């Protein structure tokens, strides 16, 4: 578009100023749909010869920002550390200023401020850069930087630890610079063996009063063997105690192998009928503790000696 010619001065002095403005639109992203080019020049004809000035052109445009989010793993469980990477590239023709990146972490994933690192990439060259400290609010982490030149990539790398609460979320986090696309990444959260399992403890002892409880003067029996429903074989220690960690939660059963205790038989229980069995059934909760106790008594012929 060419603006009207403006003439200044009297008949003896004539100055002509030409101001031309072009609006260029095309197949640019939404973030840079308009580019403005402004050209100005001047000339005068009241001198011995016509004099034309130089031509000045001013162009204005917008930065085009593209954001990519990745991580070092596809799945994690409580206690793991995930390394996230944000890559913000300026594909426009002008610099982007006041960079503000916001990243909303998944439920149960905690940002580690001391892990924050930054760098610039241009072509195959990468240069470390000191990023201002991130600002955290609830699960949202905000990164800032003054400017990003055309064809330059700002890399933001940080670590986050997965807590047990992460199992209640979906593992997806969302990042965006207010002029860029929305970038997401999802880590599949596994329960982990420790959170799915529990611990079994128990003892094998000589029950003298047949109440199913170990009293003072009722010694433990060493080297007794208990077989678990999953095939595990447990042997009691010198005090008749045993424990088994990382047992899958649910209904678990154990059976006392009386052949491992020559001279002993199962002690009768005068108070609980279900205890008059070589097997014990317990309910083990995830991360919980359950107890299996087995009472034995010397065999009759052993008592006669």
Image (tube, grey):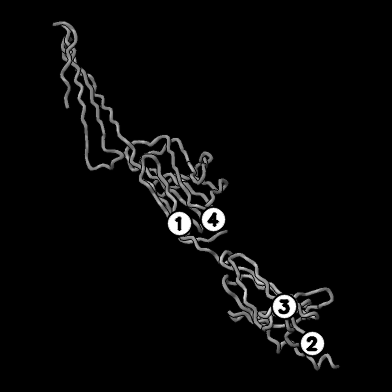
Q: Nearer the viewer, residue 196 or 31?
A: 196
Give the side of residue 26 with respect to residue 172, left or right: left
Find residue 50 and report its horizontal and vertical position in percent. Answer: 16, 15
Mark 2 nearby-residue class (10 Å; few <14, some 14–19, many ≥20): some
Res. 271 mark? 3
Verify CB contact (< 8 Å) between mark 3 and mark 4: no
- On the image, numbered disc 4 is attached to which residue? 165
Q: Position of residue 289 (x, y in %)?
A: 65, 67
Q: How many angstroms separate mark 1 from mark 2 (CA)?
A: 57 Å
- Callout 4–callout 2 Cβ contact below 8 Å: no
Q: Quick check: can you spot residue 130? A: no
Q: Is residue 274 above or below residue 250?
A: below
Q: Secondary structure at mark 4?
A: helix
Which residue has dot 1 on it? 170
Q: Is residue 104 visible?
A: yes
Q: Residue at x 74, y 75 (%)?
A: 241
Disc 3 to disc 4, C-alpha distance: 43 Å
Q: Nearer the viewer, mark 3 or mark 1?
A: 3
Between 259 and 298, which is closer to the camera in this rendering? Answer: 298
Residue at disc 2, secondary structure = strand
- The quarter of the displayed image where residue 295 is located: bottom right
Res 18 quadrant in image: top left
Sequence-wise first label, 4 or 2: 4
Q: Given the current orientation, which residue lies at the most extreme front position?
A: 271
Residue under pointer 2: 298
Q: Residue 50 vs residue 228: left or right?
A: left
């Amino acid at each position: 578009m060419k603006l009207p010619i403006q003439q200044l001065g009297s008949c003896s002095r004539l100055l002509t100023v030409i101001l031309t403005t072009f609006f260029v639109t095309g197949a640019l992203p939404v973030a840079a749909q308009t580019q403005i080019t402004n050209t100005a020049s001047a000339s005068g004809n009241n001198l011995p010869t016509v004099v034309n000035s130089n031509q000045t052109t001013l162009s204005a445009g917008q930065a085009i920002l593209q954001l990519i989010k990745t991580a070092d793993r596809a799945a994690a469980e409580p206690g793991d550390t995930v390394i996230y990477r944000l890559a913000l590239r300026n594909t426009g023709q002008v610099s982007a200023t006041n960079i503000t990146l916001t990243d909303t972490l998944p439920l149960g994933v905690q940002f580690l401020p001391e892990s924050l690192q930054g760098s610039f990439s241009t072509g195959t060259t990468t240069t470390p850069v000191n990023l201002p400290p991130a600002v955290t609010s609830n699960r949202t982490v905000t990164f800032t930087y003054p400017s990003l030149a055309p064809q330059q990539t700002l890399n933001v790398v940080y670590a986050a630890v997965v807590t047990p609460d992460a199992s209640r979320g979906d593992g997806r986090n969302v990042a965006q610079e207010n002029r860029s696309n929305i970038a997401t990444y999802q880590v599949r959260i596994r329960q982990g063996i420790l959170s799915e399992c529990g611990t079994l403890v128990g003892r094998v002892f000589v029950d003298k009063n047949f109440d199913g409880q170990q009293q003072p003067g009722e010694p433990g029996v060493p080297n007794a063997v208990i077989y678990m429903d999953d095939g595990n074989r447990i042997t009691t220690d010198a005090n008749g105690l045993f424990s088994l960690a990382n047992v899958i939660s649910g209904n678990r059963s154990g059976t006392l192998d009386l052949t491992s205790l020559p001279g002993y038989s199962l002690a009768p229980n005068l108070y609980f009928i279900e205890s008059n069995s070589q097997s014990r059934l317990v309910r083990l909760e995830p991360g919980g503790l359950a107890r299996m106790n087995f009472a034995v008594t010397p065999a009759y012929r052993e008592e006669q000696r």
